[in-house]
Amino acid sequence: MSRFRTLTAALTAAALTLLPAALPGAAHADPAQYAPTMLILDASGSMQRPDQGATMMDSAKKAVRTFVDSAPAEAEVGLATYGTGTSNDEADKAAGCRDVQILQQPDTIDKPALTSAVDGIQARGWTPMGTALRQAADALPSSGPRSIVLVSDGDDTCAPPDPCEVAKELKQRGVDLVVHSIGFAVDDTARAQLTCMAQATGGTYSDAADGAALEQILPRVSSAALRNYQATGTPITGTATYETAPVAKPGQYLDTIGQHEKRFYAVDVPAGATAYFTGIVAFPRAPLGAATGGISALELRVYGRDGAYCNIRERELESRTGDGVAFTVSNTLERATEEPSGGSSDSCKGGGRYYYELHWDEVPAGLPARLPVELIVGIEPGVTDPGPSSVTKKTSFAAPAGPAEPVSGGGSFTVATTLDGSGKYTDTIQNGEYVFYKVRLNWGQGLAYRVRFAETGGAGYTTATNVTTTVYSPVGGQIHEDTNAYTGRQATDLEGATVPIRYANRDADEIPVQQQSVAGWYYIAVKIGMPSGTTAMPPTPVELDLTVAGAAEAGPIYLTASPDVLGEQSQPGTEKPVAVSGSDSTTPWFAMAGIGVGVVALIGIGIAIRLVSRRRA
């Protein structure tokens, strides 16, 4: 039986009566979040300069309104400005250099209020960028990923504090904050200062020559700022030994793990069922010019009754932690499907309580002492009928016709952007970003695609970087990866494809085909790594051409299991050990949690599940 034999992401028609509300083990998880972001808008007197028949301030307001209109409803966006309270005369300098206003806190976006605040800004004063940067950072949450997007038409006229030094100070304090700056018709001095601010925090600098360019660039950069990774889940605290390990029912959990630390968690597995356990750690992105290499490792071990080691050890290595990667270590446990034989190995057979030890055991220099860790627990029965036989021929790519649809990919699998079938899609990606899209494939359907990274002129071969695209299945399997070097001097194409999706694919000889055995959401990840030099590459336009082909087929028929598994999720650690047996219940049952999402979304006969890239050194 292959490792993926009992891993499922779909219900048959007989099980479609199971609604998301019947999955309390997942429903209690925190909702997915975007990275809280502050916009800082320059309102100094120089913004009254003419631009395309209006003023630069008018053009900036129009660009902000365009972003607000397109921002996700769940985004957390605040607004700060400077220069509105005084003139830019020398007599007003002391007051003008303190003139920073927080117009909107970075709460869930209130589009009418944010638009109204922008419309009310009057440009007239000085340019205290360093002070504005500090106050915007203070307005953001004190932990977790967050971003600042600064639009300015010139350099700081109030230093000290120097804005570049403020950015470095924030990064040195360990603040997980990225600054993206946009120079609006700036000179070389201002461009250098704005670039320094962005590079000091691992962010990006963009040039906008006029209002029309700003209206295109600001929504893209702001959307990218919202892409920062956000760990989510029901709080849980792992322990140093298995005896006190908290019990995790099916769902998603959020803990922290320290360098070289071991954390134990317990899972009750019914007899005959298969259990899935995944740990996910996301690393902070290194500033531009800093080393992105360094090996980090996550190890997962499984123990049975009385803490007996089951000789199950999974280990994953990541060699580019500075790229801000998120990687996983996971285990598929089929021991509960084995009948105890009365021997010494019975502690790791049959239903009962199993223990998972997660260990962060290799750590490169420069990482925080502790990092968030997401934990995914899933339990699933077998099938009575797997459906049609496996297929190994990949889906053929056909270049789509018609206009391209602009999209903004998500910063994680949680918020991956839906691509509605065959067509052309365009996006813009910054250095160091991992951008995610999802495509729904029913049984019998497959996808093929091409990603084109456009020619941008680049900054020369000294700043070459790697570009990558990866296809992931709904169960965490890496199906295909294509990578190449990229300098921006010429367009670069990457591609990927799946076979038609069938449950029986998990019994194929080829491992990638085995991973294409689940109907539901398939994920396309597109990455531009950090450049090898100290100069950021320009924001890169990409075009994703997608083919979805094949007629929908009937899926497998699953067994049922005890509805007790779907009982209300209690506080972790309060349950007593139980030996869970099979059941003759006819209740339709499925309890695999969506990674990062926290709730299982039933889509047709599939489910949506978020994944995280797994990379080996």
Image: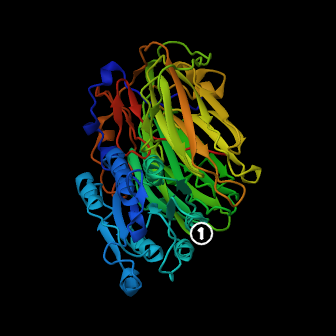
Residue at 44% from the left image edge and 53% from the top image edge: 222
Instruction: Count numbered badges in the picture.
Output: 1
Nearest to the observer: residue 224 or residue 320? 224
| Element type at mark 1 | helix
- Specify the amino acid type for callout 1: Thr
From the top left corner, tell me how far across and down residue 380 is, in percent.
43, 33
In the image, is 382 to the left or to the right of 12? right
Nearest to the observer: residue 610 or residue 178? 178
Is residue 33 in view?
no
In the image, is 516 to the left or to the right of 442? right
Question: Quick one: which residue is furthest to the right in this view?
Answer: 461
Question: Relative to residue 425, is residue 352 depicted above or below?
Answer: below
Residue at 59% from the left image edge and 69% from the top image edge: 189
From the top left corner, tell me how far across and down residue 12 is, in percent.
36, 21
From the top left corner, tell me how far across and down residue 203 is, in percent.
55, 59
Nearest to the observer: residue 244 or residue 210? 210
Residue holding disc 1:
189
Question: Relative to residue 150, is residue 582 depicted above or below?
Answer: above
From the top left corner, tell me how far across and down residue 471 is, in percent.
57, 33
Count residues near mark 1 (Cα–Cα under 10 Å), then give few for <14, some for 14-19, many for 20+. Answer: few
Q: What colour scheme governs how the chains and residues are painted in the rendered image of this protein?
A: rainbow
Nearest to the observer: residue 298 or residue 558? 298
Quarter of the image for residue 10 reads: top left
Residue at 31% from the left image edge and 57% from the top image edge: 571
Is residue 307 in view?
yes
Question: Relative to residue 504, is residue 410 depicted above or below?
Answer: below
Q: Quadrant of the N terminus?
A: top right
Question: Relative to residue 281, is residue 425 depicted above or below?
Answer: above
